[in-house]
Image: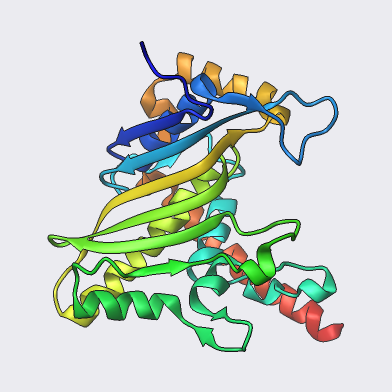
Amino acid sequence: MSPEFDLPLVHVEAQGLAEGWEKAVLGCWERGVRIPTQYDREEDPASRDVSLALAIADPFGEPRIHRALPGGIYDLEVYRQEVVDGVHDHWIDPEAGKWQYTYHERLEAYETPDGVVYDQLDYVVNALAEATYTRRAQAVLWKCWEDAGIDDPACLQRMWFRVYGKRLVLSCHMRSNDAFKASYMNMYAFTELQKTIAERLSERLGREIAVGQYNHFVDSYHIYGSYFDEFEKFLETVEVRSWEERTWTMDMVQPMIEEAKEKIIRDLQAERERNAKD
């Protein structure tokens, strides 16, 4: 007799990012328990919720892009730059009612209550350069003195890095993750950061460290009831469209990414000009 669990654990192994995300989302839909959330409207059905353990063997293998990603390629590139480059760190101003943090800020400028600031990614690179097999190369994002009780506390909790052979493995741990509307963009940006750390480490060591396995662990991996109608349309596309029709390779979207990069530069410049006038 199979054991019964309060919160099912969905375990997914996949070769690439698009495949892993699709399998994880479908697993959430098929096995998720029904539970309300703090964001529900009165008419919304209860969300479907699981815990997730997802392992992706080659996160930069093709096809890397799933066409059902939320938003579009512009939004994906903006989010990548937000996580990897910190293009929106200047939006952090909780006293003015703006953002309370960004992942980039928590990773590269983690400030303690006594005002000490830590660049955790520098620490990760230094730790791995000293011993690639160390189990201590991690960065944390939760600040209990700030995050407990706020409206939008950090979902990403921890990043753990280790080199196996000649490949850098990254495990990301999230307390909460919107499976359908956010998790693909999260995985995409986090693996882009994984690539950046691999490049920095390669430079430090004087030998190539490639991007290796990516693991995505989530305590609450959920599909909100308010999205169910939209998600059912996604299920229909999975049934009627081929894998090639549901995905893109990076070469296919590269022109759109370049256009997005140019637009982001223009948008940031326009924002700076507005702020200067204000």
Query: Is 262 in front, or is 93?
Result: 93
> In the current view of this chain or complex, which residue is farthest to the bottom?
115
Q: Where is residue 171 in the image (x, y as percent from the top left)?
A: 36, 54
**Apparent side of residue 54 relative to residue 31 in the rendered image (left or right):** left
Residue 101 visible? The answer is no
When the figure is inspected, residue 196 is found, relative to residue 251, above or below; the finding is below
The quadrant where residue 53 appears: top left
Relative to 162, does residue 227 appear above or below in the rendering?
A: above
- Image spot of residue 23 (x, y percent): 41, 29
Which of these two is toward me, 264 or 197? Answer: 197
Residue 68 in view, yes or no: yes
User: Residue at point 21% right, 63% down?
Assistant: 163
Establish if 23 lies above or below 95.
above
Q: Is residue 143 left or right of residue 57?
A: right
Q: What residue do we see at 58% from left, 81% from top?
A: 111
Horizontal side of 197 relative to 101 (left or right) equals left
